[in-house]
Image (cartoon, coloured by chain):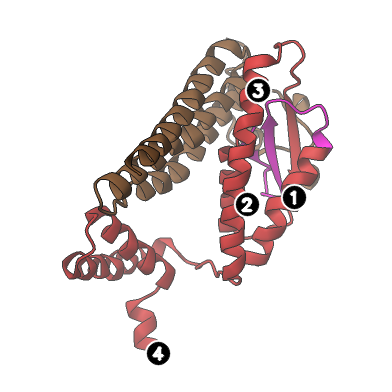
Chain colours: A red, B brown
Amino acid sequence: MKLLRRIFPHPHLSFLLTIVWVLLANAPSLNSLVFGLLLGIVIPFITQPYWPDRPVLRNWPMVVEYILVVLWDIVMANITVARIILFKPDAERQPNWVSIPLDLRTPEAITVLAGTITMTPGTVSCDLSAQGHCLLVHCLDAPDPAAVRDQIKQRYERRLKEIFE
Amino acid sequence: MEFLFELLIAFFLIVSGIFGFVGSFGMIKLKDPMSRLHAPTKATTLGVGGVLLASICHSVLVEGRLSMHELLITLFLFLTAPITALFIAKWHIHRHEKPENLPDAGEDGLWATHAVEQMEDVPDHSKN
């Protein structure tokens, strides 16, 4: 077990690297799989000092649910934002800053949350507070900042908390 | 059957074209820099996503082979796009926003960009 730990300091990273290499090769073959595995062993081993903690994923079904929720939200938000850009006069639009107090403490979880917020059209995550306890989000059109905050906390942060913490 | 496939592929291409156009149009129409930042996030999600879906459909349905590069492009986009957006946003906060214009940062008092400015005594650029 200890030897296994030393060869695979980050099992998730090794797995991900192997998958990415096989996908890059674009033709599933033993050749690319073996080389991918080699990369999956060597790269985490060399970069080990830069990854002192490894994120633990506790809830795999939730990961799938999270991805589906985000994809659905991206499509819906795209349509909403397209309507705002095309049809709403600039004077009626209310761009707004929203401050989101974070319950998440894991850096990886906060990164995923910030990335998700940026990728959903209509909101861009702009800054963290000095100690990482709040997230600053800019909204394209938000007459009610509190509603945006509650929606982000309810839809994304709650699920991420179950996945990472 | 062939016709249905082509219809599906064309649909995805049109969707991507529309959202790519709206994203570019937003860059012209929106006036303040922070709002402009929202336009490219649209182009990278459904705009590029539509082309990638069309490409997957074409390789599976017409050429009869599975192509996975599109999934990787999506993955890399989702990794890089938020980071560029964050850089631009931070630049904007650094040059144009005062701490009192931003909402309350809760228990920490300041947002990270301003906190760094105070700590390291960075020269004030916001006047030029």
Name the spot of residue B106 as percent of width and height, x first: 80, 43
Q: Which stretch is magenta?
A: A122-146
Dot 1: what SS? helix
Q: Earlier in the sequence, mark 3 or mark 4?
A: 4
Q: Is residue A92 above or below residue B11?
A: above
Quadrant that contains the N terminus of chain A: bottom left
* Relative to B104, A39 lies left or right: left
Q: Which label number is shown at residue A83? A: 3
Which mark sits nearer the N-terminus, 1 or 4? 4
**Residue A4 appears in the rendering:** yes
Q: In this figure, which residue is indicated by the disc labeled 1? A: A153
Mark 3, mark 4: which one is toward the viewer?
Answer: 3
Q: Residues within 10 Å of mark 3 (few under 14, many from 20)?
A: few
Q: Label 3's element?
A: helix
Q: Chain of mark 4?
A: A
How packed mark 1 is, by other alpha carbons closer than 10 Å (few <14, some 14-19, many 20 or more), is some
Give the vertical position of A153 relative to A40 (above or below): above
Question: Looking at numbered disc 4 in the image, what kind of residue is underneath it?
Answer: Met
On the rendered structure, is A29 left or right of B10? Answer: left
C-alpha separation, residue under disc 1 versus residue under disc 2: 14 Å
Q: Is label 1 or label 2 in front? A: 2
Q: Look at mark 2 in the image and give the residue it sits on.
A: A69
Q: Mark 2 falls on what kind of element?
A: helix
Q: Secondary structure at mark 4?
A: loop
Query: Do callouts 1 and 2 point to residues on the same chain?
Result: yes
Q: Residue at x 82, y 39 (%)?
A: A147
Residue ID at (41%, 35%)? B7
Amino acid at pointer 1: Lys
